[in-house]
Amino acid sequence: MEVEGMEDEGPSSQSELSQSEDLQSERQASLLLESSAPVENVFVDKKAVDKLTEGLLSHYLPDLQSSKRALQELTQNQLILLDTLDQEVTKFRECNALPDLNSLFMEAKVYHNKLVNIRKEMIMLHEKTTKLKKRALKLQQQKQKEALEKEQQREKELERERQLIAKPAKRT
C-alpha cells in the first residue's frame, strides 16, 4: 500500500513513510513472536530493521513502479483497442443491416443492360428515320420533276396545237 503512495508523493512524505514502516515492522515482529512455537525474546535493533526495510524498498521499488507504469499503459492500450473493436463491430452491424449489396448490384446491372438495349434501339430507329426522310425527299423531288416535265410536255403540246391550227390567209 505504501509503495503506491510513494510514487505520487515527494520527499516531504519520507517521515510518514518511516513511521508507517516502523509500525509495519513492529506488527511483523509481533506476528513472528506470536507464530513461533518456542517463545524467545529476540531483540532486533530498530535501526537495522529500518535500514533493511529501506534497502529492500529501494531495491525493488523502482522495478515495481516501472512495472506499474507498464501495466497502466497496457491497460490504457487495451481500453483503446476495445473501443476501436467496438466501433468496427458497429460498422459491420450497420453493413449487415443494409439490404444485400450483391442483389442491388445485380439489379443495377440488369437495368444498365436494359438502358443499353434501349439506346441501341433508339440509334437504330434514328438511322431508319433518317433513311426514310432521305427517301421521302428524293420521292418528293422526283414527283416535282415529273410534274414539271408533264407541265412542260403539256405546254409543248398546246404550243404545237396552236401552230397546227389553221390560220386564215390574209388578203392582199
Image: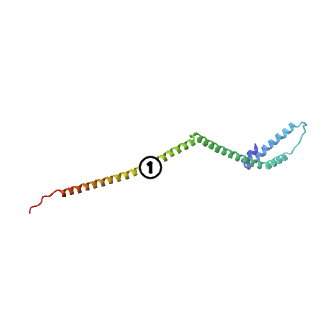
Which image quarter: residue 44? top right
Q: Nearer the viewer, residue 5 or 70?
A: 70
- Is residue 13 something one can see in this rendering? no
Quadrant where the image shows the N terminus: top right
Give the quarter of the image for residue 148. Answer: bottom left
**Rendering coords of residue 33 (x, y %):** 87, 38
Mark 1 nearby-residue class (10 Å; few <14, some 14–19, many ≥20): few
Task: Name the spot of residue 7 as percent of width and height, x first.
Answer: 73, 47
- The answer to whether residue 170 is left or right of residue 38 is left
Residue type, mark 1 in image: Met
Instruction: State whether residue 8 is above or below residue 157.
Output: above
Q: Which residue is mark 1?
A: 124
- As drawn, the residue found furthest toward the left would be 172
Residue 95: x percent and y percent? 59, 42
Q: What residue appears at the point 37 percent right and 52 percent down from the top-left corner?
A: 135
- Figure quadrant of the C terminus: bottom left
Residue drawn at point x = 65 percent, y = 44 percent: 85
Q: Residue furthest bottom?
A: 172
Q: Is residue 47 left or right of residue 131?
A: right
What coloring was used for the rendering? rainbow
**Which of these two is toward me, 75 or 30?**
75
Q: Secondary structure at mark 1?
A: helix
**Residue 111 locus on image (x, y percent):** 50, 44
Residue depicted at 80% across the width and 43% down the height: 22
Q: Quadrant of residue 87?
A: top right
